Image: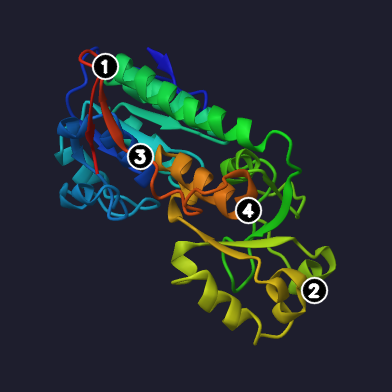
Amino acid sequence: MVTDETGRRVLVPFKVNRIVSLAPNITETIYALGLEEKLAGDTDYCDTPAAAKLKPHVGSMLNPSLEAIVALHPDLVLAAANSANRRETVDALARLGVAVYATDSRTVGGMFESIAHISSLAGAAQQGTALVTRLQARLNALQTRLAERPLIHVLFVVWEDPLITIGQNTFIADALRWSGAESVVIAKQDWPQLALEEVVRLQPEYIVFTGKHSESSGTQVSDLRSRPMWKDLRAVELGHVVNVSEEIDRPAPGLIDAIEELAHRLHPDAFPGENTSAMNRPPAHIRVDASEENYSCAR
């Protein structure tokens, strides 16, 4: 009997051989731990790594097929409570006798805790410890570089029309802090809607988009300079527009890649002579064989 990250008591089989993931960040974590052979199925949106797209799918995150999940005979279903999956789905599966453990990562540290919980439930605690140790070491090295630098005030764009940004208690807000930045918007809601007039008043130093919004920051700047209100932002005038990897949207191991990438873009002077995209760094999706201390790429 365990307590999941939402406070639910869950009876989990002693040995877990078949797992169904209901969120892309969980699927990515399973692969990073080298547990893909235990992954019996995932959702239509699980696309990292590419091999995840070949697993049997159970539908969307918000409305997965209960029949498809049960048909896969999972020992354990892993859900993400933080906006990805609905409590109704978790409760419905529980009534069918399916063990469902829900994660709820609201900080980078919380994401590390979720990795540890998932690995422990799957009988791979050693792999989980090794993965978290490596990721934490990368963050520690990053903080050493940024220790003396003031935080950059940014507007993080979750959605453009309507304009939606992040609240203070989201894992993205915490990821920004690790990158040497903080949101220029202070809001208790997780995903507050914002008027462009307010953005002009706040005048963020940088605007941060995810890769899904634009092919490059160059085309994004050119477009914004031709649009009403956006062109009134000093960040747009100065070309301080950053497109960061979509991994910034997921509390999964790839989030560390995105944090490093964003830190390089916002604080290039902290990384003299290094590739500002941080693409020369080892990817976070490295499978660790803790017993033999060997590394192999899991992407």
Which amino acid type is marked by label 3?
Answer: Pro
Q: Is residue 190 left or right of residue 79?
A: right
Question: Where residue 65 sits in the image (x, y, percent)?
Answer: 26, 50
Q: Which residue carries the number 3 mark? A: 282
| Mark seen at residue 234 | none
Q: Which residue is mark 1?
A: 290
Q: Residues within 10 Å of mark 4 (few under 14, many from 20)?
A: many
Numbered disc in front, either 2 or 4? 4
What is the C-alpha distance between the residues marked 2 and 1?
52 Å
Report the side of 265 relative to 254 (left or right).
right
Q: Which mark is residue 266?
A: 4
Percent of width and height locating residue 63: 36, 53
Q: Residue at x 16, y 48 (%)?
A: 56
SS under mark 1: loop
Task: Say few, some or many: other residues with alpha carbon within 10 Å of mark 3 (under 14 / 14 to 19 / 20 or more).
Answer: few
| Residue, disc 2 | 197
Question: What amino acid is labelled 1 in the image?
Answer: Ala
Mark 4 to mark 1: distance in Å? 34 Å
- Decide which of tag 3 and tag 4 comes sooner along the chain: 4
- Indicate the position of residue 13 as horizontal and vertical percent values: 25, 16
Disc 1 + disc 3, Cβ < 8 Å:
no
Mark earlier in primary sequence (2, 1): 2
- Residue 283 placement (x, y as % from top left): 35, 41
Q: Residue at x 33, y 43 (%)?
A: 22
**What is the secondary structure assignment of the residue under circle 2?**
helix
